[in-house]
Image: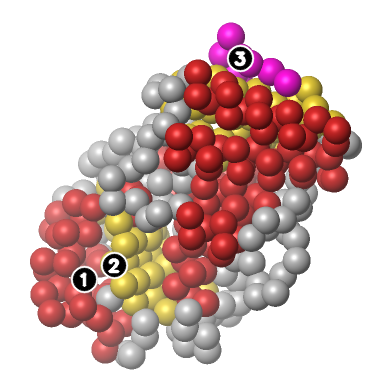
Amino acid sequence: MAPTADPFTHPALFYADEAGYLAGTVPFIEAGLAAGEPVAVAVPGERLALLRKTLGGDADRVRLLDMEQAGRNPGRIIPRVLRGFADAHPGRRVRIIGEPIWQGRTPDEYPACAQHEALINHAFTGRAATILCPYDTSGLDALVLADARVTHPVLIEDGVERVSDAYAPDRVVAGYNLPLARPPGVRELVYDADLLPDARSFATHHAETLGLPADRREDLALAVSELTTNSVIHGGGTGTLRLWAEDGQVVCEVQDRGRLSDPLAGRRPAEPGQLGGRGLLLVNYLADLVRLHTAPDGTTIRCYFGPPVRGAEPRGQYAGEAGAGGEP
């Protein structure tokens, strides 16, 4: 990769077809294995199967993850996938292929994906790691490819590597920090410290009437408890909870007067023995998507919950890993 004073490198790989994909990813994996570096691959299922077949026996030496499951919510990719792997190998340089954007990502999901790609640069500054992010030039919109040039300091295309002259990741973080429009017919509750139990009951009741399965209602209730408690403690003592159905999912939204100044809030793994500061991390683990808008006069956090995904990791483990916090 291009020389840099930082041990972390974050190239975007532009590929147009299967041959280009393999030409850009397989040598990257093999070079890491030859150097004795731990290697992980988190890409959509179809690409994962292709790489597993191409690598043959070497696939057993690589941590393979289906990004359509592990990274369904872009907000949990940094703590759960990338940092999860890097932190498991302290003192060693790691190589990771992460493909968080693919055809089929919805317009609601994409802004969170773009912000994720930008925030990787802050989350891994100073760490000995290389995270290669493939982009399908034949299937992704021009805007997505343009954003990739802004969120990645190094670009690889047609086997040629160059420094990106458009690199400005904070511009993407700020550019997608947009007000979140909501549909009509929303169920709404204004709450304070005395009404926190009511907020949870309100959420589970309306989630049931909107058709959310029982196990996912439990996830939603836990997320609502974390977010509403954060409002009371950090968001001015009160907030507004809203729920509605959208495209087969139940959406819950918490709005309060707090301002979230740390763009990596909820994206750092909890330290062993850490007390508090895990609430938004847990929400990222539980929800299928988390969108956020923060401004000087308040913050809105929106979470999407759909039916369980076949083959997804059981979410019950996340509560023990993230803990219950009450802080973002």
Viewer-side residue, 153 vs 77: 77
Q: Mark 1 points at which residue?
A: 26
First to last magenta residue range: 181-189
Q: Mark 3 points at which residue?
A: 186
Q: Judging from the image, what secondary structure is the residue with disc 2 in?
A: strand
> Which residue is drawn at the image coordinates 67% and 33% (left, top)?
200
- For mark 2, what is the residue? 64
Kind of residue sitting beneath label 3: Val
Residue furthest to the right: 236
Q: Main secondary structure of the magenta part?
A: loop
Q: Which of marks 2 and 3 is nearer the N terminus?
A: 2
What residue is shown at x 18% (from left), y 64% (from top)?
51
Give the mark, 1 or 2, whose residue is nearer the N terminus. Answer: 1
Residue 288: image location, x then y, percent: 46, 41
Q: Position of residue 182 (x, y in %)?
A: 59, 18
Element type at mark 1: helix
> x, y percentage for residue 144?
41, 40
- Asked if residue 187 lies in the magenta stretch, the reply is yes
Q: Which residue is drawn at 60% across and 53% down?
A: 282
Q: Quadrant of the N terminus?
A: bottom left
Residue 163 position (above or below residue 302): below
User: Can residue 180 be seen?
Assistant: no
Quadrant of residue 37 within the rendered picture: bottom left
Confirm or deny contact between disc 2 and disc 3 (CB under 8 A).
no
Tell me the colour scheme of the image: secondary structure
